Amino acid sequence: MRLLNFLRKQLKRYDDSHNFTCDVCGREVFGNERICKACMERLPWNDLEFCPLCGRKVREPGICIECKQKPLGVLKARSVLVHEGEAARLVVRFKRGEKYLYRTLTEQMLPLMMREFEEETAITYVPMTEKAEKKRGYNQSRLLAEELAARSGKKFLSPAVKRKETASQKFLGRRDRESNLEGCFHVENRHAVKGESILIVDDTLTTGATVSELAGVLLRAGAKTVSALTFTGVANKAPFGLKSES
């Protein structure tokens, strides 16, 4: 029985570290890749025009209208993909129980992180309340941060907690999200963040209110700088000079 259990554990470890089908289309793959070549080519990569501050896709080069009105509370933010199509579906699947996708997401996030955030010394995540994490079964932001820290050799930090539940932000604009999040994060370990250049890792950047709120408490706790990296970012679709709807 012990041998059987041992073999089962070894097989599970092998399955967790090897991919046999594409995580987007489900077709069989042969090179252990997590996303097949055809799907990689179809994904909405955020590598054309994007705001240099919030990193979201824009229609014209330069700082987006929202950042002109009120920049995010981070030094800079970047997203690997635009939050649409299969990229958005990957995030939804990851949040709704397909925990194993953290490897797929971090595999695509790592090159951008190493290129854009070389100077950052530590990586952290967006905390959840204990109740919310228990309901989901895991904190998806933490899984991404831990994996990126392990792959890059950067320091992993877990200094902050979320002290209160917040209302669903799905249909809220930036101002309402900021009000909803105000005072929800607290840094318990100030010594850990003092003097660090910290990278917040999360799955999606929508309005940026969440990373801004967390960045604020990290900076007040003594962090040198705070930036943000997400797998996807919601495009800023407002033309320059026009007020954004969100």
Image (cartoon, helix red, strand yellow):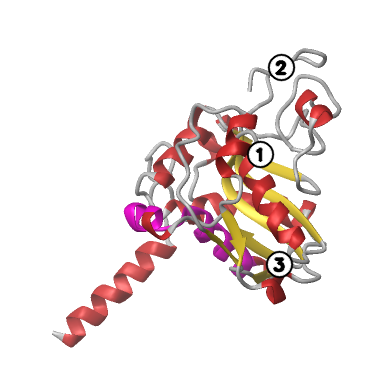
Q: Residue furthest bottom?
A: 2
Along the viewing direction, whichever of 165 and 120 lies nearer the viewer: 165
Whether residue 33 is visible to the viewer of this picture, yes or no, is no
Image height check: is 233 above or below 217? above
Instruction: Give the left or right position of residue 166, taking residue 76 as reference.
Output: left
Region of the chain picked out in magenta, as a range: 132-151
The residue positioned 60% from the left and 70% from the top of the image is 188
Q: Residue furthest left?
A: 1
Q: Quadrant of residue 2?
A: bottom left
Quadrant containing the C terminus is top right
Instruction: Give the left or right position of residue 233, taking residue 92 as reference.
Output: right
Amino acid tagged 3: Ala
Judging by the rendered image, the residue that carries numbered circle 2 is 238
Secondary structure, mark 1, is loop
Q: Earlier in the sequence, mark 3 or mark 1?
A: 3
Q: Quadrant of residue 59?
A: top right
Numbered tag placed on residue 122 in the rendering: 3
Amino acid tagged 1: Gly
Residue 56's spot in the image, x, y percent?
Answer: 71, 33
Judging by the rendered image, the residue that carries numbered circle 1 is 208
Secondary structure, mark 3, is strand
Indicate whether residue 65 is drawn in magenta. Answer: no
Quadrant containing the N terminus is bottom left
**Nearer the camera: disc 3 or disc 1:** 1
Q: Are marks 3 and 1 in contact (CB under 8 Å)?
A: no
